Structures are given as C-alpha cells and as structure tokens.
Amino acid sequence: MAEIQLRDLWKYYDDVPAVRGINLDIEHNEFIALVGPSGCGKTTTLRMIAGLEDITAGDIVVGDRVINEVAPKDRDIAMVFQNYALYPHMSVFQNMSFGLKLRKTPKEEIDRRVNDAAEILNIGELLERRPQQLSGGQRQRVAMGRAIVRDPQVFLFDEPLSNLDAKLRVQMRTEIKKIHQRVKTTVVYVTHDQVEAMTLADRIVVMNEGVIEQVGSPEEMYDAPQTLFVAAFIGSPSMNFLPCQIEAMNGGLTIRLADDLSLPVPDGREERYKDHIGKEMLFGIRPEHITDKRPHTDPTHHDFTSDVVVLEPMGIDTMVFINIGETEITTRSRPRAVSQVGQAMDFTIDMAHMHLIDPETELVL
C-alpha cells in the first residue's frame, strides 16, 4: 500500500521558510494535486517526497516506512519533470528501459514492460525514434512511459504540461487521467494551473506561502472555499469580491453592496452573520451566479439593473462587465440577452451561492 503521510514538514533555505509545518495524508491510489502560485512551496514539497531536497524538520512516511533518510533511488518513487529529461542520443525504447537496465532487470521483463507502457501511451510506433524526432506531446508521453515501466509505488509530476501549447495541454490532461485509471497508483501532481488541478485530481491541496490553505475535492474547493485566497485562486474567471455591510432590517439581515443595491441574506445564514452587523465585510460571488435576467421563483434569486461597461463574447456565453458601487465585476450571460456597451441591462443574482468574508481574518464565514 502506498499511502503518503507528511507530518509537520518544514523546509528552510537559510533563514527563509519555504514549507512551514504542513500535514497531509494521501490515500493509496489517490490522485492529489498541489496547486498554488509561484513560491508557495508546492515544488519544494514534491522534491522532499522524492528525496531531492533535504527535510529541515518533520517526517515523510510512505506505506509504513519513514523515508527521510532513504536515498531517492531506494524510495520506489518515479518522477516526471517539466523538461522531460530524455537522453538525446538514445531511442525512445532505450530511454524508457534505461532505469530497468541499471537495476539489472532481465531483458524479457524489460521488453514486456516497455511494450506494455508504449501500448498504454499509444507510442508503440515511436520506440525506435530519437527525442529530436518527436513533438512536445510525444516527448512527454515518453517521459511518462519511463516512469510507468518502473511500476513504482508513487508517481510524482512536476508541472509536466507547462512546456506544451494550450491545445496540447488539454489533450495531455485527458491522457494523464486515462493513464491513472488504467495504471492505478498514488499520484502527487504539482501545477500552478488551477484548471489542471480541478480536472485531474481526486483532491486538491491549495498552498500559499509555505502553508496549506485548504484540502478538498474539486467541488468542495469551488463551491465551499474556506479562505479569501482559495476563493480567489480557484475558478476561471475569478470570483467577484465587493465591499459590503451587513444590516438588520425588518427582523432579518440584508447585505448592502451599494447605495442603491441591498439584498436579503439567504435563509439559514442569519445566525452565522449576525455578529458582523455594521462591520466592513467582503461579498464574494462567481460570475455564473449573476446572469441576464430570467424568470424565477426561488427566494434566493433577485433582480437588479446596471449599465454594461465591457462585453467579452466567449461563444456559448458572453462575459458582461458592470459596476456595482465603485467595484467592477464580471457576470456571465447568454449572448443574445446582452445589452450594448453603455446601455442598462437587467440581471438576476443567485444569493444562495454568495460568500461572506471577514477581511481581517480572510476567512469565509
């Protein structure tokens, strides 16, 4: 079994902490994505698991074995890098089999493993080619094949799609997901691209400045962020944030977003929000929850009017930029329902999907 446990893991570079006391349990055969901006500690964490970075403090446990002092080659971990790291003078077959030859694996076993991996990756016809004869996507497949033939306990991916163009990244995301379904093993995948994390992972770990902000499924990250950072980082386009105030009115609570726009707090949230009456707060809502006006009977849906500032046609949808108070926000509408720039447009907002954030603690209430 290849469970991974990170226990109070720290990494310092001189006096600068890159990873600050993180704790994480990764289940056997789980696909985990470490995601966050540059410098958040995700790659450092991955390299500590691989044994390529020394641990300042804490433990890394794989299965039932603490591997802090185990050499990288003895950890039964395979890593796929951003730059592929293929030997240019070797064929695809030789690149994929090189590690097995170093381990003195029998030739018949090498042939079987390489051919099996080539079939999974659909690169059987490329085995005699050299890396310079391959496209970027084919080179990435070879790098993955080199890892697969080792049959490791754990796969580590370090931003493997960063060097590919946009179309090929989408294609390779699908391929990686298919491969994980066929070659069941534990995967830790590092990326700065939250779309990759959302589409690939069973669970996402959002990191920020060396700490874990939140761990959860893609759905949990999107629908129930726990902090301002996660709310802003997950989702494309990003969540809208507006300054607001909670006010008591007619025995209930309302959220004032502008002098001319005040909306009722959804039922069931009064108890959570009542201690913040009169305090400056942040109101968060995703663009798809503010749409062109539509018929509705749901008590959490409310209508308002605003002038169109900018239109961004996206094909199936049009992103409509408007101002609420002094804040510009993004909304998502049907293309044929939008008004022209400078004209008034009617919108419907779904308050069931709102988030209230304390700007002092940056926690979502």
Image (cartoon, grey):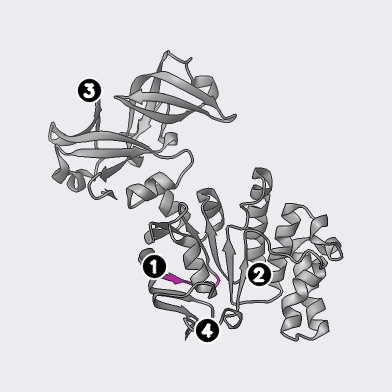
Mark 3–mark 4 Cα distance, whole angstroms, equals 63 Å
- By secondary structure, the bulk of the magenta-drawn segment is best described as strand
**Label 3: which residue?**
259
Secondary structure category for the residue under label 1: loop
Q: Position of residue 20 (x, y in %)?
A: 36, 66
First reached walking from the N terminus: tag 3 or tag 2: 2
First reached walking from the N terminus: tag 4 or tag 1: 1
Q: Amino acid at mark 4?
A: Val
Q: Which mark is residue 70?
A: 4
* Magenta stretch encompasses residue 26: yes
Q: Amino acid at mark 2?
A: Val
Viewer-side label of 2, 4: 4
Viewer-side label of 1, 2: 1
Q: Amino acid at mark 1?
A: Asp
Q: Amino acid at mark 3?
A: Asp
Mark 4–mark 1 Cα distance, whole angstroms, equals 23 Å
Give the residues in magenta: 21-29
First reached walking from the N terminus: tag 3 or tag 4: 4
Q: Position of residue 128 (x, y in %)?
A: 87, 65
The answer to whether the residue labelled 4 contacts the one labelled 1, judged by CB atoms less than 8 Å apart, is no
